[in-house]
Amino acid sequence: MSLNKFVPDVSSINMAYLLGIFLTDGYAGKEGVRLRTIDKDIAERFCDIGFELFGKCSKIHKFANNSGDKHKRQDFYEVVIYSVQLSRWLKDMTNSKKNIPEFAFQMNDIWLKEFLAGILDGDGWCSVNYKRKNNNPTDRLDWYATIGFCGIKDSYVVQSESLLQSLGVQYSKYTKILDSGLELVEYKIKVSSFIQNSLYFNCNRKQQKVELIKLHSIGQRYNTDWNKGNSK
């Protein structure tokens, strides 16, 4: 990296993750790049990347969330990597979080999976629960799992379709209008395709559910129809 111009090694795994998590939960400010997350391990990873880039360890601050439904409130962590150069670079490379950088699609699968992991850690989910199938006449419950991510249409999320296709991932895409008028784009990744393509979360809270899916072969035992008309 030059002392006069910020020229990071974009091929590094840490840079792949930084770009992914920035597009979701990051903010490029005047003094540096801020990340807010409910997961401490993600905040720590963000700190480690900042240390690798600049040799300075950022502090992790914990805040109580007192807004919204008190039953859904979760404390969150905030970290700032103080670097005007990094902030400008991320903002320029992503067109203020509206685009995935062009160079990303030239990277190998290992890099792309880490980049996707950053997106999934920020805007993604993995849920595992019991559900009675509609075609089941009994009251027997079966394990059910969903994996996916979403974002507003006027953001990087539109180009994520090309990312999933380049990795050979099966998915379904949906759009809906929020009460605010914003259009939301949602991708649901086929559980078996997620596992077969060795995709993952870096967020331990979410990855633990993936391990549960693997352990019990949830969503992988049967060759059931996958959203006919919407599968990719």
Image (spheres, grey):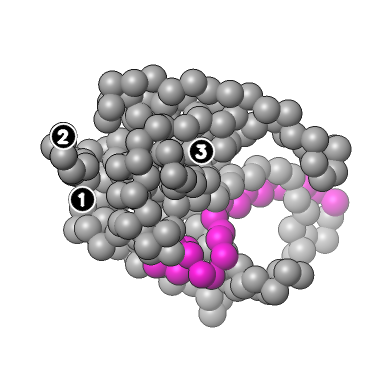
The secondary element bearing badge 1 is classed as loop
Q: Is any part of residue 205 visible from this angle?
A: no
Q: In which quarter of the image is residue 149?
A: bottom right
Using residue 195 as the reference point, say whether residue 76 is left or right of it.
right
Q: Residue at coordinates 34% horizontally, 49% vertically from top-left?
A: 88
Q: Where in the figure is residue 181, as x and y percent of width and height?
A: 70, 74
Q: Where is residue 60 in the image (x, y as percent from the top left)?
A: 53, 23
Residue on which disc 1 sits = 108
Q: What stretch is highlighted in magenta?
A: 139-160
Circle 2 — which element? Answer: loop
Label at residue 161: none
Is 218 or 138 nearer to us in this picture? 218
Task: State which tag comes first along the sequence, 1 or 3.
Answer: 3
Amino acid bearing label 2: Leu
Quote the CA–CA distance across marks 3 and 2.
25 Å
Instruction: Residue type at mark 1: give it.
Output: Asn
- Mark 3 = which residue? 35
